[in-house]
């Protein structure tokens, strides 16, 4: 990612016992501060990423595009965590 971003880390995995006990596991989040443009989406220029740190070795966990819209129209799959925010 390029441009202005916000970052933060989360040690929840380690707090919950991690993998086979305390492991120093953490998530590291990086996100742009603006929504992805149609051009960026077309060219697969992602707007956020999550890295996993396990025992000092970091790896890319997942990534995606940013948006300025929240919620949905209840048309998404039941396997998502989306909730209709237009009540």
Image (cartoon, grey):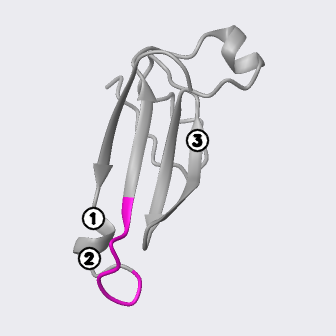
41 to the left or right of 73: right
Q: Is residue 25 magenta?
A: yes
25 to the left or right of 72: left
Pointer 1 and pointer 2: residues touching (CB < 8 Å)? yes
Q: Quadrant of residue 70?
A: top left
**Count of numbered circles on the image:** 3
Mark 2 Cα within 10 Å, few/some/many (few <14, many 20+)? few
Magenta residues span 19-26
Residue 78 seen in render: no
Work out whether 18 lies above or below 12.
Answer: below
Disc 3, SS: strand
Mark 3 Cα within 10 Å, few/some/many (few <14, many 20+)? some
Q: Quadrant of residue 8?
A: top left
To which residue does mark 1 refer?
A: 12
Question: Is 47 or 56 nearer to us in this picture?
Answer: 56
Choose the circle earlier in sequence order: 2 or 3. Answer: 2
Choose the circle earlier in sequence order: 3 or 1. Answer: 1
Question: Is 40 or 80 nearer to us in this picture?
Answer: 40
């Amino acid at each position: 990612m390029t441009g202005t971003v916000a970052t933060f880390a989360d040690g929840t995995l380690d707090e919950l016992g991690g993998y086979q006990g305390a492991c120093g596991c953490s998530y590291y989040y990086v996100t742009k501060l603006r929504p992805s443009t149609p051009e960026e989406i077309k060219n697969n220029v992602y707007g956020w990423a999550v890295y996993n740190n396990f025992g000092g070795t970091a790896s890319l966990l997942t990534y995606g595009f940013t948006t300025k819209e929240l919620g949905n129209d209840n048309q998404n799959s039941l396997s998502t965590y989306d909730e209709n925010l237009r009540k």
